[in-house]
Amino acid sequence: MSLGEATEPEKMEGAGSWDVLEWTKIDPISRSVSLVKCDFLLEAEEVVVEGYGVVLVNTDEAGTVLVTNYRILFLSEGTRNIIPLGTVPLATIEKIGKIAVKGQSVPRQPEKNPSQRLLQVIGKDMRIIVFGFRPWTKQRRAIFDALLRWTKPAGLWDLYAFVSGPSKFRNTNPKLRLLNEYFRLIGRRSHRASMSIVEDCSFTVGNELWRISSVNANYSLCQTYPFALIVPKSISDEEILQASNFRARGRFPVITWCHPGTGAVLARSSQPLVGLMMNVRSNMDEKLVSALCSNLSGVMGTRRKLYIADARPRKNALANGAMGGGSESSSNYFQSEIVFFGIDNIHAMRESLARLREYLDTHGATSSDGMSSFLRHGGWTWGGGNLSSMSASVSTLGDSGWLIHVQSVLAGSAWIAARVALESASVLVHCSDGWDRTTQLVSLASLLLDPYYRTLAGFQALVEKDWLAFGHPFSDRFGLPTISGGGNTLFELSRQSSTGSYSSSPMRQSSGSFTTQATSSSHSQASNNSSPIFLQWVDCIAQLARMYPLAFEFSSTFLVDFLDCVLSCRFGNFLCNSEKERQQCSVSEACGCLWAYLTDLRNSEGKSHVHYNLFYDPSKHNGPLLPPAAALAPTLWPQFHLRWACPSEAQVGELEAQCRNMAMRFSELQKAKEVAERKAKEVAATVESLTADLLRERQLNTSAVNLAKKASKENAAIKRAIQSLGFKVHFSGNGDCTVDIEANPPVSPQVSMYSYSQRESDDPIQCDEKSDLSVSITVVGDEVLPNNPITRVCESLCPMRTRDGGCRWPDAGCAQFGSQFVGLRANFDAFDRLSIYDSHFDSDKR
């Protein structure tokens, strides 16, 4: 819909400091909803409401705000270009709030300082932005109401991912990709997954230690586990059914990664239900866990050690005993050792990231409280973009606690990887439910152990296996509707007082007083299960990529773009809480695929795309990464944490930027070289063809010369032979010659024509040119006498001569000298008139 109020004064004549904007002097300009059909809208994206003359307080930039069914768009007033800072996908919004700020009043002129209408938007991607609206209009209310409506859809199917459909980024069935990864893990690479084997459950293959089980094919055993599971070969499906009752939510121990050489495994589960007294046991569970510790290869009768890694603090694990949970006792599990990592729960992570976000917004160059305006004008000395990603380490950001939590996850994962790689031990990891901290640890440890997961294809396989298939509740953690909760209860935006909600005020008290009228969050405080667990895991990967710049095929830019796609919910891969729910909603058929979208981006530029790590060298790190504890000192991830608060710090390092520019230049030169080489090959082929043609012409010329010489010699020989008979021979320029025979009696002349034709049969080159020699001989005599030389020759040699001295072929006009015909100009018409009975044989011999 469009705003009726948008016809009031709305044009911003410049973007100066927030406090010097004179709202009352803005000239009224009528607007039309002409931006609805702009090219920057995505497929099925529609504009819901518009607001003109809006100021982005962070940068003091005026423009237009559009709310669509997918995102907030902020367009620059002058250029109409999209401003990235003010453009936020609706699913990425965590909180929105309306704030009214009153400026310092002027005596007897209170109307000169009306309240400034602000709208604060807090994103899950570390941004806090504030839009300023003109007073005496209802634009802010319209924008706020639209955001409330579209950030809390009535149901899962109202999300943009379902509205837009799969488009060109179609998804294949994720079950096939999961099975292919299982086949790789158990060493059955020759097997390829298909829908037929999924439907008839014929994927239950294995090796000497492990097998793929279909015990959960219909999700009846555990609704949050995948349809296929890797379990010890020595454990039957009936025993698995019994063991599942001893673990919270039925998430019994299963294998998530196995070492191809030593047989050591990473396994995951939820907490055991040992009870308050920690004395409840399960024989089937103990047998299943014991089966994870196969014998050490090469050492007969020696079992490998088992570590049970509890991600929680010890006190939290004990406290869970009051609710029936708890932790294992090493005395109940043979040759095992229990380790507690002390990683805090989802609520601590959520609050820690919120504090970090506020800290960065306060100290960043584009603060949402408008202080950047005062700093630029020299009015303040506080804050102002003093943030440095390298100086902002664990010690300086200790109040937020975020980097300490990241360090705890990194340390726990590195410890697990070291036990598997150095001791060939098996490790069982769990927390309370086994889908948050457990997923972080096992997936990060797998990435440290297996170089395949450090490639782009392996990263996708890792995320789909450990995060999606094993039921990390993405909808709950991102604050999205689910099919299990009905869409409204799990995604309730409630208006409430914001007293104390924002430690960083939208406007400082020195510039006036402020009152927060209403705020909104994605959950009520009592039932808020959102938490940046997945974001924290990607942050850990970015820290490892900084420590090992040659070990990862993907770049930090890829991780940022990947997170943006996940948080935006533009695609359906990360909707719902489990594989079962995504299957019920037909997500893979109804929504686009994030992986196909990212692959399409990379294919557009090849290896020079920013998603590829320029320094990747798989030969340098073709084994496990085992970082020492001293190296696990994380810093801010500038490309993600600082890109909104301090854009200059968020840029990639100078060396990497130079290398990427050089790589792009090299790629361009490589393409130019290929074009030049292709043209050179074409020219070479042309030259070669012309050379061959020239050689053939030379050969033809040589052959013609030789034929001419041979013909000349033959002509001379014939001439001498004819002259020896007393004839006069005259050669014409066309190759004909005339032979004159003179006698005393004048009689009517008899003319004989001699034609000689020679064709070089052994000429190796067949062409249109014919090497023919034609000689015509005209014989003129005074009388025809029996002693005439030609008559004698004819009588003695001609096969057409009759016994009575006649000629069976009088019109042939031929002559023959000696044993050689000297030309024959045949009269074929006369030849045809010869009777078949004419012969030189006697009649009595027939």
Image (tube, helix red, strand yellow):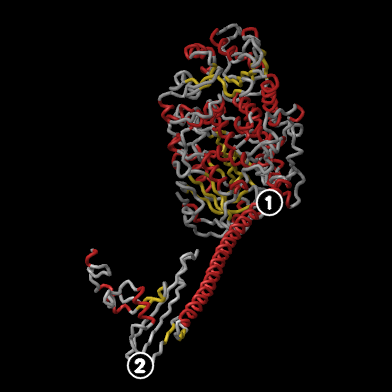
Q: Along the horizontal axis of the image, is 10 left or right of 613? A: left
Corner quadrant of residue 199: top left
Q: Amino acid at mark 2?
A: Pro
Task: For marks 1 and 2, give the one nearer the viewer.
Answer: 2
Q: Position of residue 728 (x, y in %)?
A: 45, 86
Corner quadrant of residue 467: top right
Q: Name the residue nearer the viewer: 41 or 674.
A: 674
Identify the disc placed on residue 745.
2
Disc 1 marks which residue? 661
Q: Earlier in the sequence, mark 1 or mark 2?
A: 1
Q: Considering only vertical position in the picture, is 701 above or below 672?
A: below
Q: Pointer 2: residues within 10 angstroms few (<14), some, or many (20+)? A: few
Q: Along the horizontal axis of the image, is 42 left or right of 257? A: left
The alpha-carbon separation of the residues under discs 1 and 2 comes to 108 Å
Q: Name the residue nearer the viewer: 346 or 795.
A: 795
Q: Position of residue 72 (x, y in %)?
A: 54, 46
SS for dot 1: helix
Q: Position of residue 618 (x, y in %)?
A: 66, 36
Q: Considering only vertical position in the picture, is 126 above or below 665?
A: above
Q: Amino acid at mark 1?
A: Asn
Q: Along the horizontal axis of the image, is 552 left or right of 484? A: right
Q: Name the residue nearer the viewer: 419 or 635.
A: 419
